[in-house]
Image (cartoon, helix red, strand yellow):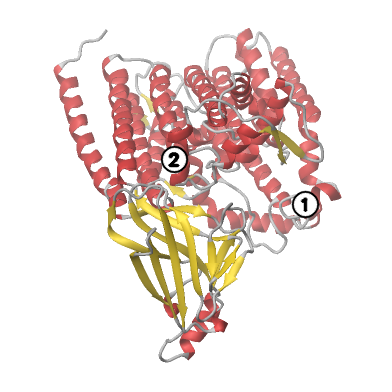
């Protein structure tokens, strides 16, 4: 083991001091703020379309059991037409549109907190609450009653309260009469203790990440791929904790598709009529989550993660077929199947699938970095981008596509830029990765296979063998595409009437006929989309917006990572292996053509299937669709006229990990907004 010298000790001390200051700042800005912000919880959720219209003189009493020890506030959510209210307010000089008196009473009928609301100040979906200025203890399990008195309200205000019929033993009275349903009920408690626990655990993880990465690079002098196994593992765990299941775009669809294949492996069979057969235990666990992270989800994770046993029975749910091959879901399929066979609870089954995705990500990126013949720091940084980690630690089929594309490009670069003859293992890997690329995402990334023609003749014994190799690779890619992906392409390009009816736009998209009949419309919309959203595609490709685009990462982190990527692909004087690497003009042109072709396929598929007629831009395009092209895109910025005198790749990689800590802070800030 290498000795930690005086310079290392000073740097570790400085790193620790900076981290403590930063952690204190984060604590003040993201944790303490939660101490004064109440955390709302829904005790009874209104059913869609079920409303009670309030009238002048209404007296409503709704009993419920308070769920927590701290009594902070309780109330209900109202609904109204804001345009109607706005017109009334503008026409009424005295703004006398009525008052709602809200009172919260204990078991004895004594008022414990109350609030009055003037109707003219209300907004749609506003929460009417009565609260204490500070929490009172000892209220868990006690019966409280919400009392509403409506005075002077006008009928044309249209003020309503949502209710549900799903609560057994409802105790609602309206004007002295009993009703067999319950109003929506909202309560609140402080979140400080909860987030303080998460802050301590998260800070410990991030400090471990920084110190471990520093020691790996500066003291132990480990290879980049070895340090990645540590740094990538810690970052994957952090993202796993911050972004619950289903918060990654389209993850629910992909999870169900993996479950569909898992049913075959477990012998559970399949339902008919487009339905998926799920174990009730797993369905119940899945129902806990929503696309936007919520505090209740984190509570369920903390409280239910280690519960035992499984519910009996099966639930049939809608199965949105993605038309994607099983190989793109392989890690998730393995995790789900193992969890079900081991009899784990539903939450652990879902998380075991995610953990298998993480293991596949770590393995794939380890070999990506190791196989890269040059620019290993750039490969390391690409492996720890926020978007890479988000997608590769989820059920999304983008994870396998990204990983296979990176591995394919690493093997390709080995064939292009190394001097020794082609080895059998390189051919085997090249064919394997090329087949997977050809059958995934409708062949969007098949243009990468064209780069086979760039492999120099010097890698073969003669020119004939090179072109035989190129021809065989082309035949394999085309056969793989036709045998597996053609049906998906036909589904997108020319769906049947039944498929169109069940699609996102129900047949109102342009389709293949639209792109053939109006090619100029497609070109015009492509250019307009690039001009309006091109910067957004670049930023989201790296990971500026995560979790259905409502969790934001600071541009400081994103553009810092981009700068590091651009510097990492430049030539280093005396850098081992790099002084022999040159990107020729022909190679750059080829890389640009491949990027344009794959990008055009992305735009065309979204134009045909996701863009409604009459739209001025192409809809549905996300930056992550271009992430598999990033390694060759970066080489467009390689310049033989730029040469770095000193190899500081290790510093680039450590800086990238440090910027990930900034990204995590951005995620925390965003979660504060949306929770």
**Residue 656 point in image, percent of width and height:** 36, 33
Residue at image location 30% in from the left, 42% down from the top: 193
Tally the numbered discs: 2
Left or right? Give the position of 207 relative to 156. left
Relative to 19, does residue 169 appear above or below in the rendering? Answer: below
Q: Residue furthest front?
A: 108
Q: Residue 511, which numbered label?
A: 1
Left or right? Give the position of 129 relative to 182. left
**Residue 404 point in image, percent of width and height:** 60, 25
Residue placed most toward the observer, 177 or 5: 177
Sequence-wise, the earlier of marks 1 and 2 is: 2
Residue with the mark numbered 2 = 298
Packing grade of label 1 (10 A; few <14, some 14-19, many >=20) is many
Alpha carbon separation for disc pair 1 and 2: 41 Å
Residue placed most toward the observer, 174 or 332: 174
Residue placed most toward the observer, 482 or 660: 660
Element class at badge 1: helix
Q: Is residue 289 visible?
A: yes
Packing grade of label 2 (10 A; few <14, some 14-19, many >=20) is some
Q: Is residue 515 visible?
A: no
Left or right? Give the position of 217 relative to 169. left
Say which quarter of the image contains residue 109.
Answer: bottom left
**Residue 565 point in image, percent of width and height:** 42, 34
Say which quarter of the image contains residue 556.
Answer: top left
Relative to 597, does residue 100 appear above or below in the rendering? Answer: below
Residue at image location 41% in from the left, 45% down from the top: 553
Relative to 502, does residue 6 appear above or below in the rendering? Answer: above
Element class at badge 2: helix
Q: Residue furthest right?
A: 497
Say which quarter of the image contains residue 260.
Answer: top right
């Amino acid at each position: 083991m290498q000795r930690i010298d005086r310079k290392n000790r000073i740097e570790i001390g400085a790193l620790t001091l900076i981290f403590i200051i930063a952690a204190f700042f984060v604590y003040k800005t993201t944790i303490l703020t939660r101490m004064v912000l109440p955390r709302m919880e829904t005790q009874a959720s209104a059913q869609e379309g079920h409303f009670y219209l309030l009238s002048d003189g209404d007296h409503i009493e709704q009993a419920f059991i308070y769920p927590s020890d701290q009594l902070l506030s309780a109330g209900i959510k109202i609904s109204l037409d804001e345009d109607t209210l706005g017109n009334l307010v503008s026409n009424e000089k005295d703004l006398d549109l009525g008052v709602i008196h809200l009172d919260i009473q204990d078991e004895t009928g004594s008022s414990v907190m109350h609030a009055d609301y003037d109707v003219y100040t209300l907004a749609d979906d506003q929460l009417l609450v009565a609260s204490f200025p500070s929490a009172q203890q000892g209220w868990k399990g006690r019966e409280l009653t919400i009392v509403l008195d409506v005075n002077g309200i006008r009928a044309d205000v249209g003020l309503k309260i949502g209710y549900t019929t799903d609560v057994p033993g409802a105790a609602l009275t309206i004007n002295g009469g009993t009703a067999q349903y319950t109003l929506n009920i909202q309560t609140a408690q402080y979140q400080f203790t909860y987030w303080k626990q998460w802050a301590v655990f998260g800070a410990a993880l991030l400090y471990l990440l920084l110190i471990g990465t520093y020691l790996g690079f500066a003291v132990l002098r480990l290879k980049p791929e070895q340090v990645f196994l540590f740094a990538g593992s810690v970052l994957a765990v952090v993202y796993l904790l911050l972004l619950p299941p289903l918060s990654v775009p389209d993850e629910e669809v992909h999870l169900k598709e993996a479950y569909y294949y898992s049913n075959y492996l477990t012998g559970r069979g399949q339902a008919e009529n487009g339905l998926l057969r799920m174990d009730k235990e797993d369905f119940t666990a899945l129902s806990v989550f929503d696309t936007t992270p919520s505090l209740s989800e984190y509570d369920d994770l903390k409280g239910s993660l280690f519960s035992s046993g499984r519910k009996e029975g099966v639930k049939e749910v809608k199965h949105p077929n993605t038309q994607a091959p099983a190989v793109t879901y392989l890690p998730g399929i393995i995790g789900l199947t193992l969890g079900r066979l081991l009899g784990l609870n539903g939450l652990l089954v879902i998380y075991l699938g995610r953990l298998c995705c993480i293991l596949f990500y770590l393995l794939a990126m380890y070999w990506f970095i190791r196989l890269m013949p040059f620019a290993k720091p750039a490969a390391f940084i690409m492996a720890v981008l926020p978007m890479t980690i988000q997608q590769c630690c989820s059920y999304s089929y983008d994870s396998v596509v990204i990983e296979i594309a990176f591995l394919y490009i690493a093997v390709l670069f080995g064939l292009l830029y190394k001097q020794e003859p082609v080895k059998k293992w390189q051919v085997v890997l090249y064919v394997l990765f090329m087949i997977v690329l050809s059958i995934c995402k409708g062949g969007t990334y098949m243009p990468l296979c064209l780069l086979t023609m760039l492999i120099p003749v010097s890698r073969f014994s003669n020119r004939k063998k090179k072109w035989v190799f190129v021809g065989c690779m082309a035949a394999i890619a085309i056969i793989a595409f036709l045998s597996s992906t053609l049906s998906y392409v036909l589904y997108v390009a020319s769906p049947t009437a039944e498929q169109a009816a069940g699609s996102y736009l129900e047949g109102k998209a342009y389709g293949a006929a639209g792109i053939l009949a109006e090619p100029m419309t497609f070109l015009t919309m492509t250019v307009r989309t690039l001009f309006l959203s091109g910067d957004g595609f670049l930023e989201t490709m790296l990971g500026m917006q995560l979790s259905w685009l409502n969790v934001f990462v600071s541009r400081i982190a994103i553009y810092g990572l981009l700068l590091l990527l651009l510097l990492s692909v430049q030539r280093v004087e005396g850098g081992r292996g790099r002084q022999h690497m040159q990107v020729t003009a022909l190679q750059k042109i080829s890389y640009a053509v491949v990027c344009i072709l794959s990008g055009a396929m992305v735009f065309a598929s979204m134009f045909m299937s996701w863009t409604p007629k009459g739209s001025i831009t192409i809809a549905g395009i996300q930056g992550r669709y271009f992430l598999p092209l990033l390694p060759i895109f970066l080489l467009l910025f390689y310049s033989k006229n730029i040469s770095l005198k000193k190899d500081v790749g290790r510093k680039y990689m450590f800086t990238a990990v440090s910027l990930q800590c900034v990204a995590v802070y951005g995620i925390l800030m965003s979660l504060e907004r949306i929770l």
